[in-house]
Each structure stands twice: as C-alpha cells, then as structure tokens.
Amino acid sequence: MPILLYGNDSQKEKYLPKLASGEWMGCYCLTEPGAGSDANSGKTKAVLTEDGKHYLITGQKMWISNAGFADVFIVFARIEDDKNITGFILDKGMEGITMGEEEYKLGLNSSSTRQVFFNDVKVPIESLLGGRDNGFKIAMNALNVGRIKLSAAVLDACRRVISLSTNYSNERIQFGVPIAKFGAIKHKLADMAVRTYAIESATYRAGNEIEKNIKRLESEGVDRQEAHLKGIEEYAIECSIVKVLGSETIQYCSDEGIQIYGGMGYSAETPMEAAYRDARIARIYEGTNEINRMLLVGMILKKAMKGELDIMTPAMKVASDLMSIPSFETPDESKLFAIEKENIKKLKKTILMVAGKAAQHFAMDIEKEQEVLMSLADMIIDVYTAESGLLRTEKLSLKNGEEATQHQITMSKLFLYSAIKNCQKAGEEVILSFAEGDEQRMLLMGLKRFTKGYTINPKEMRRSVAAKLIEENKYCF
Ligand SMILES: Cc1cc2nc3c(=O)[nH]c(=O)nc-3n(C[C@H](O)[C@H](O)[C@H](O)COP(=O)(O)OP(=O)(O)OC[C@H]3O[C@@H](n4cnc5c(N)ncnc54)[C@H](O)[C@@H]3O)c2cc1C
C-alpha cells in the first residue's frame, strides 16, 4: 500500500505486479521497542554515504507481520535530525538484515511475527519512498487503508462465528431441547447478528464513500495516485470508526460464541477458542482503539478549527433550541424509519451539544481530557453506525420490499436502540466531567430530551432475529 500510494513509476513497476500476484510478500516495519503508538519517535537511522549514492540504515523494528517470509520491507527511519521519519523500500537478502525468533503469541499463529534488525544496511537512494521527512504521513495514510481493511476482514470472522454458534445451538441438547430454544441463547445470537449487520453497513458505507470520492477527484483531473491518497485521507475519520467498532464486534461475537459453546468453547478442539484469541489483536494493531478514538475526535475538532467543518454554529443552535419549547410535530409513522431518522437527528444534536460545550469549556486543553474524548468517540461511532444500518436497510427495502427486509429493519432498530442508550451514558459522563450548577442541569435536561422516547420491544425483536438465524442455521442477512 505505501508503494501504491507514494511510489514513483519505477518503484511501482518493480514491486507492485509481484506483490499483487502474491509472488512476493511484503512487510511493514514501523513499530520499534520504544516507538509503538508514538510511531514518529522511532530511533532507526538512515545515514547518507559520502558518495551520496546510498543510505546506511541501522535500527530495530518489532512485531513485524510477515517478516519471516517477506521479500520486500517497507522501513521507516530518520535522516539526521529530521522532524519526521522517512520511508524506504528494502529487499530481502540485503546485507545487514537479520531477524529475531518467531514471537510466541496469543493468536494469529499462522502469521509470522518477528523483530527485524538493520545493521548498516546499504540501500540505494532510489529506494527512498515518497520524499524525505514524509514517512509519518505515508505510515498514517497506509494505516487509514489498513483500518477499513481490518473492519472488512473481521466481518467475515463475525459471520463465521455467528454461523458456527447458531449451528451449535441447534445441535446441543440440554434439558431435553436444543439450547437454541432458550431465550438467553436467542438474545446472544440476535445481539451478535445486530452488531455484525451494523458494522457491515458502516464498513460498506465508508468503502463506497471512499470509492466515490476517489472517482470524483479523478473526474476533476487529479492524477490517479493523488486521487487515491486524498480520496482515502478525507475519510480517515470513517476508517477509524469502522476499525474500532469492527475490532470490538469480533471480540464481542467470539466471546459470546465461546459462551454459547459452554465448556467446549474453552477447548482448543473447537473453533471458538482460536476465534477469540485471534480477535484480540484487532483492537491493538492498525493503531490501538484508544489512539483511534482520540484520533477521530481530534480530526473532527481540527477540521472545525480549520473552518472545514462548522460544528460551532449548529452546536450553538442546539443550545438555543434547548431554551425553546419542544416541537410537538410528530414524524409520519407510515414512512419506513421516519421515527428512527428523527432519533438520529436528535442523537446528532446530542453530540453537538455535548462536544460543543466540552470544546468551549476545555478549549485547547481538551486534548488532555482523554476520558472526555473517549466518550465523545463512542457517541460518534454509535451514531455513524446506527445511521449506516438505517440507510442500508432503507435501500434494501426499496429494492426488495419491506416484507423481505423485515429482519434487517428489526436489526437496524435494535442497533439504534442500543446506540441511544450508549449515547445517554457517554453523554452524561462528559457533562458531569465539567459542567456544574445551572449549566449541568440544562445540559442533562437537553440530553434527556434528545435521547428519550424511542420505545421498542427489544426482547421480542431479538427473538424474531434469532428465529431467522436458527431457521437458516447460519448468519443470513
Ligand atoms: C501480532 C502483531 C502484529 C503486528 N504487526 C505489525 C507490523 O506488521 N508492523 C508494525 O510496524 N507494527 C506491527 N505491530 C505493532 C502494533 O502496531 C503495535 O503493537 C501498536 O501500534 C501498539 O503499540 P505498542 O505495542 O508499543 O503499545 P503502546 O504504544 O506502548 O501502548 C500501550 C497502551 O497504552 C495506550 N496508549 C499509548 N499511547 C497513548 C496515548 N497517547 N494516550 C492514551 N493511551 C495511550 C495504548 O492504547 C495501549 O493501550 C504488530 C503487533 C502485534 C502484536
């Protein structure tokens, strides 16, 4: 991906066909023992040789996926005292590249993860990737793609875990009946499906938006590589959203999968044990979920400060709306999702109100208020995902009719229901963290106004989703 996004023509010609065909494997060497989340602080050095024709790269990278069998190494190193690291393309077999032993890991046992050491590795200057001092940008943009890819990858894991769990529930007899007959098991199966359907929707939506954005830029005359770069970069927030929720959804599904399998779920003989262990890494790599949560809120605030995104005007409007009498207009209930869309609007108002007031209160110091940023991120993730589910289901329903889409409609409502509950809790935490007296009372009142009144029967709705899964004996949405 770094070569595709930042390579020059001869680099792309040399590496991309063989990497794309699978003839060559690549690895991405960013993390170091002292530079994990703080990826730009790496100590690996690149020193120009006296004749100006080579760089000598020296340093240590760790946790490098594919290292054991990689043919191509993307390595980030610092030239002199540059502010940022620089990217280089190295080939297998270059003198001075050595490896640590394979890491003994919790999961991902079929992947190679090793330390890679570089000892005065002589690299031609032509191997410099994307310009000096540009490596951090390259690393981050490659990670944006990695984040949405991670979400797409975990979707398949979620579907498989749900299918296996459904299958097991249908076959395992206790108290004389299949455990699928029990409400507690139905609840779990349905919740797994609801969350998976929602993150699937968010991932498809973000992917489609990115593709459309790239095409738009290309049609405006931006060259292909630049269009890909910008097209993805402009959706970095969405990439972080789906990375966080995707990784947490597979963790949730595999955990509940073990629970459904009972003791057998804990045994290495069944697939749940590996699914659970393999899922765990997704919350750590491609930027930890904490870093991604902070990034996504940070990016929104940065866009607001640069004037690219106006959040203060709507935030102020929400504040003044709160002082007025609530509207008694009711949405047209005969229209699919009329009520749900109204609730999404209210949730967005909730975020604007809470984030706007928090930003006003903490000003530049908001960066130091990580707990607040985490809660705001949770609200944004939930609302984006709930809205994605509704939009996808609306399209499906237009295409196939409401009757054929009834389970997706139910799942979208169930996800929205939990999103409202989560936003209530997260919003309250933010408000209580800074507001006092009248301001606190007003904000809590606003929160209540924007998050109340969505009443569904979650138990019956979950049962209907579970019934479909049990009947089909697999994830079928
Ligand atoms: C199996 C596996 C494969 C990997 N593959 C690759 C690879 O191919 N290439 C590569 O370059 N790297 C790879 N990594 C490394 C991975 O990207 C890092 O582990 C990850 O970025 C976290 O860095 P760290 O482990 O140093 O944790 P740390 O950065 O030390 O973080 C530890 C904890 O502190 C939190 N934290 C850190 N900074 C902050 C902050 N500012 N505010 C709040 N909380 C913070 C983190 O969220 C985390 O919970 C891999 C790791 C593993 C385990």
Image: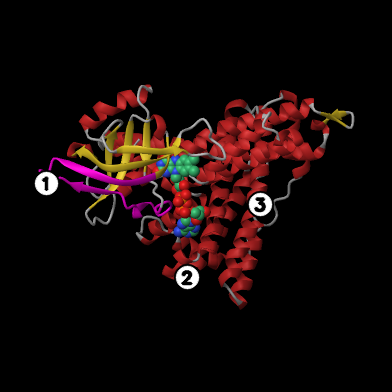
Residue 144 is at least partly visible in this image? no
- Earlier-in-chain disc, 2 versus 3: 3
| Stretch in magenta | 34-61
- Please tell me how crowded label 2 is: few (under 14), some (14-19), or many (20+) other residues with Cα within 10 Å: few
Alpha-carbon distance for marks 1 and 2? 51 Å
- Label 3 sits on a secondary structure element that is loop
Q: Residue at x 30, y 42 (%)?
A: 118
Please tell me whether residue 437 is drawn above or below residue 5 in the rendered image: below
The residue located at (29%, 30%) in the rendering is 93
Pick whichever of labels 1 and 2 is earlier in the sequence.
Answer: 1
Q: Residue placed farthest to the left in the image?
A: 51
Which residue lies at the image location 69% right of the left edge and 51% below the top edge?
Answer: 454
* Rendered view: 360 above or below 426: below
Q: Secondary structure at mark 1?
A: loop
Residue at the spot of label 1: 50
Quarter of the figure that contains the C terminus = top right
Comparing labels 1 and 2, the label whose residue is closer to the camera: 1
